[in-house]
Image (cartoon, helix red, strand yellow):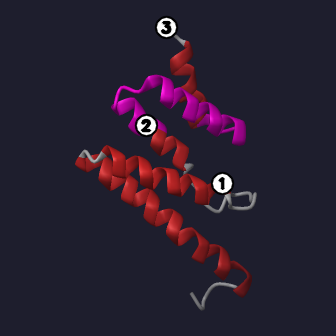
């Protein structure tokens, strides 16, 4: 980390727990451990929401997209739609959440 400018070091350190929970959520979902997956994604979302606005964003892949995809796999479509709508509220130009949300609008 010494190769990074000192003003970026605290930001990178704050991303490590977010990354850990997002990864743990993905792995738990693949193992079929739904509660553990949801707990880790919820923690990662809390951490992501605390990040300051930045372009490009500090965290490149919104965790709500991961959670929404997992909810779709579980057949929890209404919950997934809510997650994507919240992501669009926070990131109106997010094409991935917009496409996922449009799928709910088209019968």
Circle 2 residues within 10 Å: few <14, some 14–19, many ≥20: some
Residues tagged 2 and 3 counted as in contact (Cβ below 8 A)? no
> Which residue has dot 3 on it?
107
Q: Residue at x 51, y 20 (%)?
A: 103
In the rendered structure, find residue 69 and report the number of the disc placed on it.
Answer: 2
| SS state under label 2 | helix
Residue 49 is a magenta residue:
no
- Give the number of the mark in front: 1 or 3: 1
Q: What x and y, as percent, mark residue 81? A: 54, 27
Q: CA distance from mark 1 to mark 3?
A: 32 Å
Q: Secondary structure at mark 3?
A: loop
- Could you say where residue 42 lies in the image, as x and y percent from the top left? 51, 50
Our reading of the magenta stretch's main secondary structure is helix
Q: Say which label, 2 or 3, has the lower sequence index.
A: 2
Residue under label 1, please give it: 49
Q: Do labels 1 and 3 touch, CB within 8 Å?
A: no
Magenta residues?
68-95
x, y (%) of residue 106? 53, 11
Q: On screen, 67 above or below 75?
A: below
Labels 2 and 1 touching (C-beta < 8 A) = no
Q: Residues within 10 Å of mark 3 (few under 14, many from 20)?
A: few
Residue at the image point whose x is 66% and y is 79% from the top: 10
- CA–CA distance between discs 2 and 3? 19 Å
């Amino acid at each position: 980390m010494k190769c990074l400018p000192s003003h970026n070091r605290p930001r990178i350190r704050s991303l490590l727990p977010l990354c850990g929970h997002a990864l743990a959520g993905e792995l738990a979902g693949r193992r079929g451990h739904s509660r553990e997956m949801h707990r880790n994604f919820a923690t990662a979302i809390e951490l992501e929401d605390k990040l300051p606005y930045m372009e490009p964003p500090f965290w490149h892949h919104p965790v709500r997209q991961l959670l929404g995809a997992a909810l779709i796999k579980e057949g929890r479509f209404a919950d997934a739609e809510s997650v994507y709508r919240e992501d669009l509220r926070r990131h109106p130009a997010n094409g991935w959440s917009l496409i996922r949300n449009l799928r709910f609008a088209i019968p």
